[in-house]
Image (spheres, grey):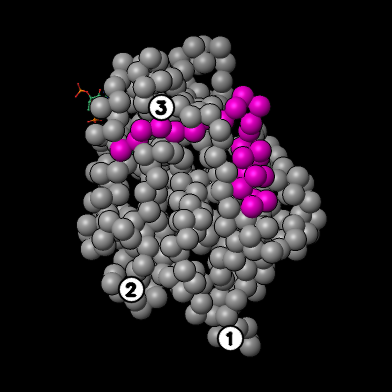
Amino acid sequence: MTRGIQPKGARITGIGHYLPERVLTNFDLEKMVDTSDEWIVTRSGIRERRIADESEAASDLALNAARRAIEDAGVAADELDLIIVSTVTPDMSLPATACLLQSRLGAKRAAGFDLSAACSGFVYGLTTGHALIAAGRAKKILIVGVEVLSRILDYEDRATCVLFGDGAGAVVLEEGPEGEGILGTFMQCDGSLGELLYVPGGGSRMPLDAQRIAERQQYVKMRGDGLFKYAVRAMVDAARSTLDEAGLQLSDIDYLIPHQANIRIIEGVRKRLKLAKEQVVVNIDRIGNTSSASIPIALSELRDGGTLHKGDLVMMVAFGGGLTWGAVLARY
Ligand code: UT7
């Protein structure tokens, strides 16, 4: 501590999520591509996922989740200092979805920016928010993970379209006493493996034209087996790093909220962290992989279920395109 600046703690004080109404089941997908309910369930654990209505964009889903989190925190929108939106499916490339949300919430004093870290985005957002609060640069931050992945999925590619869904989750992070709330954070990436999960078209490298659209370059491309290889180890390493930072043990964890990419990855992480099944939040069967929305949705559902209590130690850990991975350890 230098020059009298005291590091501040950051606590999650509000949680909310929103899922679009439309359900797309594995049986619906059987009619669209060469797949089966049996293959999807055994390989991924997914039975159904939610798909946004044509009229719904990322900021619409985000607004619903954000309103719930703000109300839950008992914070007025104009008290927010910052809005961080994690997404790879923004409404548009400019302006940021965080700015669209700022306006619709009436968060008059807030700054806002989008963060792109794929499935690790919410954990990256929490880490960023925590650092800004600890440094005394903000007191109340809204962090949203939102994805409308159905807009960038190729519904002719069975290797990807069966895995992902749409949704949004949000938390309010507020300044609190040091040593409470978020106790450990970790982020890392390896861009040399970026082509395991990417969208080639639509950026400055490959602007879309009729030919590229015909080649389906605007859609997600994924090498699932390649990702699988790294996922468990990266998530376990990230989780252990946050425990080390906090000076805590695996046995101190009450709940694990892993990114919901695949039930087999979740199980692999659970076993290596020596946790019981009841300690792990799983909703992949109903919601699929919602990328950066998956952890805040799962956190929100855990809280709504009534089993998350004040003082519980929650490990949130993610892995995704980039590659990116990271973890946040927080006392609720
Ligand atoms: O969100 C973070 C980023 N995402 C991930 O971390 C995803 C990580 N990866 C995975 O979850 C798994 O690798 C998948 C669920 C994507 C696939 O499971 P897998 O056990 O690794 O299967 P695979 O990729 O080795 O594919 C096995 C077979 C292939 O057929 P051949 O070549 O063995 O004849 C695929 O063509 O399954 C085939 N296949 C399908 N069959 C029926 C691929 N997708 C489907 C499908 N339905 N939807």
Label 2 sits on a secondary structure element that is helix
What residue lies at 50% left-to-right and 45% top-to-bottom? Answer: 293
State the image quarter where residue 161 is shown. top left
What residue lies at 27% left-to-right and 37% top-to-bottom? Answer: 226
Which is more toward the observer, 216 or 9? Answer: 9
Left-right relation of 219 to 77:
left
Quadrant containing the N terminus in the rendered view: bottom right
Q: Is residue 102 above or below residue 135?
A: above
Asked whether mark 1 and ligand 1 are closer than 8 Å, the reply comes as no
- x and y percentages locating residue 213 in the rendered image: 52, 15
Mark closest to the chain's N terminus, 1 or 2: 1
Which is more toward the observer, 34 or 327? Answer: 34
Region in magenta: 45-68
What residue lies at 45% left-to-right and 42% top-to-bottom? Answer: 291
Mark closest to the chain's N terminus, 2 or 3: 3
Which numbered tag is attached to residue 25? 3
Q: CA distance from mark 3 to mark 1?
A: 56 Å
Q: Which residue is mark 2?
A: 252
- x and y percentages locating residue 104 in the rendered image: 76, 45
- x and y percentages locating residue 156 in the rendered image: 40, 17
Q: Is the residue marked by circle 3 packed among few (<14), some (14-19), or many (20+) residues within 10 Å?
A: some
Of tags 3 and 1, the one toward the viewer is: 3
Q: CA distance from mark 2 to mark 3?
A: 37 Å
Q: Which residue is mark 1?
A: 2
Q: Residue 59 magenta-drawn?
A: yes
Label 3 sits on a secondary structure element that is strand
What residue lies at 76% left-to-right and 54% top-to-bottom? Answer: 107
Q: Amino acid at mark 2?
A: Asp
Contact? badges 2 and 3 (CB < 8 Å): no
- x and y percentages locating residue 171 in the rendered image: 58, 57
Q: Amino acid at mark 1?
A: Thr
Q: Is the residue marked by circle 2 packed among few (<14), some (14-19), or many (20+) residues within 10 Å?
A: few
